[in-house]
Image (spheres, coloured by chain):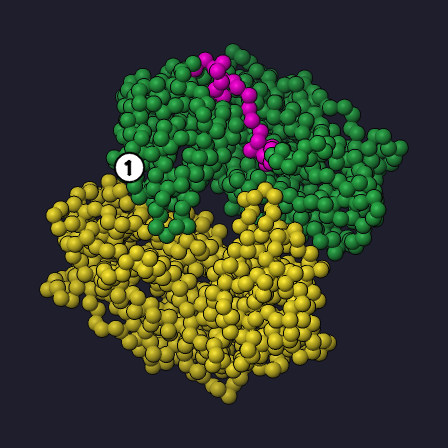
Chain colours: A yellow, B green
């Protein structure tokens, strides 16, 4: 009469695979189908932006990605023509990523390879994709609280059917999503397609000097975006026509050899010979987003199913899909663990739809400007239409564009998770408090020294991807914050603290949880001192219950590690977060790395009460796992 | 009548496996046997020093090592007792590795795991270890120039025999080497064993705060060396008795529980409970080296077969074995490729035996001092017996000790490869020329930007481990050295240049060699400019034949990569090598990373002639692969 699964995922592209990768690790039963008989073989998306690489690192998949020898893209150059000269010239060069992030480069690797890495990792959790299978219909029974979603699946050959009972149904089935159709939602395109592009992957022989640099090339002969790839391959995106062009229809019918010729022409006076073509496609640029990402709190869309972007440039399709899924995964996890109220699931659509819209704004501006082929020397991507902006301002703007594309600049609006002055938690200890941070922005990781073993650790990677909130107690100088820490530890040990409220008797007995979650799967606590590692004595400086996180006590002293004496602490992590070393502060960071609340570190109960108020606001007062022994 | 192999290796411990790993990659046929029925399972050596990790990285094995989750050791702490107090106290903390090297930590992983990684990598080159097999006898027929070594092997059960004809026989069969016995050579021990140690690997529960830091602990109850390991294991080396001790004989008979008790006692007042013991052994400290490392130029010893060290501390046994084998491997390769004269094989013994002796001097001083258990607060390892040395001097001495242990500080004496004023190449362009380098020392790598794709590259890893010399042309500012580069390129293109002399027609046709060895497997040329990457135009700045190394043109501009504008060049690589940016210099670096010659970069033929003279001195005038087409 049908099988039961926690999660049913339709589609095994990057977004669907990221979702199953997270949830399989956290112990959920998953069924995942794809209508394609095999995974992506060639072409498609091809780049992992820095934030997504950091995420894959946290999932322990980075080394497998690197083992495939991806191309690492560090710089972007711009080429144009002057009015007086037919030859193309390099007009500028810029970095491809912000430099103050963990991985300051774009990782270029075929989508098919990335999918195969995720599929192998799922196999290690005994999950195999069923293919070619397709969704026939689904219905939701709100009265059924355990498995409210009933889904009929069918083998693509019609040779088999299956009924699945699931807690959640996820549509990760791409731009033509059938889940979305049944939901009765459409992608709302921004205008009609207004540009046609060709894309071609291949091996070339050329004397063009920047063939291993990503280039925007604007010449009177057309616009080409060149992107080097793994195994010596190069991808060219070739602008073929805009809708003002009489050749529009003809452009859509362009052949591989048309596109190859166009590349040769644009690159003159450099020679370019095609040695091999690996993939070729023609597509019109369309941008759009659906009005809704979910149906109730049981059906969700991720990735291309809810937003589409023009291809050239920033690989935002795959990267946005990854981050959609990651955002949804931990929210489902918190709800299913009994930690959070179901309404936190609403924040998925609110946060990710906003991002898709921001992205389309950015993408549209960029794609349009890039398509405006002209004979003038082009200006580079992020500075388009910015003639009046000079110097400092220009650099700042460029940096923001880089941050946006890299996945770090995307920020979320206030809601029940992202604290603001309108948040129900009204404690005066919550606020921005002169730090450089605010709820909704990514917490940029710094490297600190782990006190127990002197290893340098990136704060983002200190804790494996376990779906827990991270409570970073920036404790400043131990002598300044001693009383505050004692207060906090005392309060947390009390019966009514959030730590007690959400403590989990099971977690206590699972050895693998001891290190990161000694009290609750809801959070991991880290304490970071603005002091030298050797000067920190865990027994003396980390009072009470906080001492149970002994592998998460850090010294903010890495800047000086080139100094043989390991002498003075440079407190880069404190400085970066804008936290005063004499007062400290507490950052609550969401499982996906976004800052969600900032609390003052005080010598009274305010800090602890503020944290309690914050967590209780979306978790409720007591949860089903409450530990009566404490 | 027997099989033919290029290389027959007796023993498949770390040294033997490193040798086969290199030679298998370079295309040699290898037979390797081991008398043990299976590879090392537990205990034994357990640490990879920074230089060896860099070597393993060059062999593309680092990521496999890291996938096993080794412990990374960054710091060492020292614990002692004051006269007035029974409790042990931390007296100092120091770095475990020099910080200005590529990997500034010690990688702790069981020898068995490291062996298994090397064995898997050999399997990818279709090489399997034959075991349990043993050597019965061998003889060398000097008249036979192709396969002069005849060896009889026997299965350990006596059930099978085999005769092997080989070009080289390598004894990598450990401290009790049978190859060495047949050679009639003995290890000459430095005195009788004078200390007995116990070693124990296990899981412990303790409140000792430095349980994940390497510690030297000296108390009145005895000396213990504590070393954290992978998977939460800890190793304790426990000093049991010295020969002045009446308990000497009893110490040799110590049991596991004696050693466990001793650890508990020394660590007081901290508690320590044993949860699991993984490995346990008792051994007397002995140090020694053989008089000879080779028999003629066909039989060689590597690793423990020719030198033994006391175990505690610096894991020098395995690391020295690795470096022995690597030293020998590229020399055999150059001779077998017809590039170098057979006499370069003599430098193996000269160089490596000197190192073993230096190591024993160091080791003896350290081990002895460490064994001198006393109730006084101990001073740390490298500063023993150095009461009079203060401040700056002390730091310098400590740094040297770190460099020595890490594998970077070991330096070679002058010989036919390592240029000196007594070298047959007498060109005045050869010399030290005010650089910070001299032949015989390790070339410390710097990170530079590859001009073609803007990727940061460590100069040591720029070229895969291909057995080639690296000719680093530090070209300073392009405007200052333009004429010099043109001269050099012109000369190299001439009929009598070393480049022409050692060019290899085959190499030209093998695609994989094109990138690194377009002219000859004897060398790869790299050109490093003291300029920004974007300002280097390969066509304009890299003249003639040098342009064929287009993937080895670098910009010495990395220091400024945190600067968004990629603006000013900081020339760290030039500064580190002590090379003036207005004159430049040419470094010849051996396949194993040692500087072997330094030449001035001149505007006349002197540079090229000096290089020709240098290479010809040990390679001869023309080689068998000479390309008549050029």
According to the picture, the residue beneath numbered tag 1 turns out to be B538
What residue is shown at x 44% (from left), y 20% (from top)? B431
Q: Residue pushed farthest left?
A: A246
Q: B12 or A397: which is nearer to us?
A: A397
| Residue B410 location (% of width, % of height) | 58, 29
Task: Say whether residue A401 is left or right of residue B598.
Answer: left
Q: Residue pushed farthest bottom?
A: A143
Q: A490 or B619: which is nearer to us?
A: A490
| Residue B489 location (% of width, % of height) | 30, 26
Residue B469 showing in the rendered view:
no
What residue is shown at x 42% (from left), y 72% (from top)? A412
Above-or-below relation of B564 to B415: below
Task: Say whether residue A474 is left or right of residue A538.
Answer: left
Please tell me whether residue B413 belongs to the stretch shown in magenta: yes
Q: A233 or B484: which is nearer to us?
A: B484
Residue bounds of the magenta highlight: B399-425
Above-or-below relation of B192 to A292: above
Residue A600 showing in the rendered view:
yes
Above-or-below relation of B457 to B326: below
Q: Quarter of the image for the N terminus of chain B: give it.
A: top right
Helix, strand or loop for disc 1: helix
């Amino acid at each position: 009469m049908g099988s039961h699964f926690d999660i049913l995922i339709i589609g095994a592209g990057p977004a669907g695979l990221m979702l199953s990768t997270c949830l399989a690790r956290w112990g959920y039963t998953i069924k995942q189908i794809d209508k394609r008989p095999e995974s992506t073989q060639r072409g498609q998306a091809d780049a992992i932006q820095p934030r997504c690489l950091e995420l894959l690192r946290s999932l322990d998949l980075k080394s497998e990605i690197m083992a495939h020898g991806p191309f690492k893209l560090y710089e972007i150059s711009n080429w144009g023509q002057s009015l007086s000269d037919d030859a193309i010239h390099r007009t500028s060069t810029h970095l491809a990523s912000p430099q103050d992030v963990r991985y300051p480069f774009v990782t270029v690797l075929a989508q098919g390879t990335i999918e195969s890495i995720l599929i192998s990792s799922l196999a290690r959790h005994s999950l195999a994709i069923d293919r070619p299978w397709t969704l026939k219909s689904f219905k939701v029974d709100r009265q059924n609280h355990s498995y409210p979603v009933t889904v009929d699946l069918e083998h693509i050959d019609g040779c088999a059917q299956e009924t699945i009972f699931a807690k959640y149904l996820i549509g990760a089935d791409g731009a033509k999503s059938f889940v979305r159709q049944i939901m009765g939602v459409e992608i709302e395109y921004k205008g009609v397609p207004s540009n046609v592009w060709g894309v071609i992957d291949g091996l070339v022989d050329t004397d063009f000097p920047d063939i291993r640099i990503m280039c925007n090339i604007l010449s009177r002969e057309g616009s080409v975006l060149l992107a080097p790839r793994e195994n010596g391959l190069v991808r060219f995106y070739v602008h073929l026509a805009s809708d003002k062009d009489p050749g529009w229809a003809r452009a859509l019918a362009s052949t591989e050899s048309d596109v190859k010729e166009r590349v040769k022409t644009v690159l003159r006076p450099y020679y370019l010979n095609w040695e091999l073509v690996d993939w070729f496609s023609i597509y019109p640029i369309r941008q759009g987003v659906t009005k809704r990402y979910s149906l109730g709190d049981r059906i969700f869309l991720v990735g291309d199913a809810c937003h589409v972007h023009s291809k050239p440039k920033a690989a935002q399709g795959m990267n946005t899909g990854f981050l959609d899924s990651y955002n949804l995964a931990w929210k489902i996890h918190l709800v299913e663990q009994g930690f959070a109220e179901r309404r936190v699931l609403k924040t998925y659509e609110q946060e990710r739809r906003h991002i898709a819209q921001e992205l389309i704004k950015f993408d549209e501006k960029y794609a349009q400007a890039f398509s405006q082929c002209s004979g003038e020397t082009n200006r580079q991507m992020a500075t388009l239409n910015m003639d009046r902006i000079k110097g400092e301002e220009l650099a700042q703007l460029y940096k923001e564009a880089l941050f946006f594309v890299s996945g770090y600049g995307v920020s979320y609006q206030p809601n029940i998770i992202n604290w603001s002055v309108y948040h129900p938690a009204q404690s005066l200890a919550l606020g921005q408090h002169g730090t450089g941070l605010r709820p909704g922005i990514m917490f940029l990781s710094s490297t600190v020294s782990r006190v127990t073993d002197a290893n340098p650790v990136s704060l983002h990677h200190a804790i494996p991807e376990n779906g827990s909130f991270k409570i970073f107690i920036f404790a400043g100088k131990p002598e300044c914050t001693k009383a505050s820490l004692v207060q906090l530890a005392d309060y947390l040990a009390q019966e009514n603290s959030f730590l007690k409220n959400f403590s989990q008797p099971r977690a206590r007995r699972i050895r693998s949880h001891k290190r990161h979650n000694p009290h609750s799967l809801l959070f991991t606590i880290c304490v970071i001192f603005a002091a030298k590692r050797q000067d920190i004595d865990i027994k003396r400086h980390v009072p009470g219950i906080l001492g149970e996180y002994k592998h998460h006590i850090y010294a903010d002293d890495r800047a000086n590690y080139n100094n043989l004496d390991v002498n003075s602490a440079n407190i880069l992590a404190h400085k970066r977060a804008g936290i005063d070393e004499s007062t400290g502060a507490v950052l609550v960071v969401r499982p996906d790395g976004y800052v969600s609340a900032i609390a003052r570190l005080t010598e009274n109960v305010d800090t602890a009460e503020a944290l309690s108020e914050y967590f209780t606001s979306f978790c409720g007062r007591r949860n089903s796992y409450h530990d009566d022994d404490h």
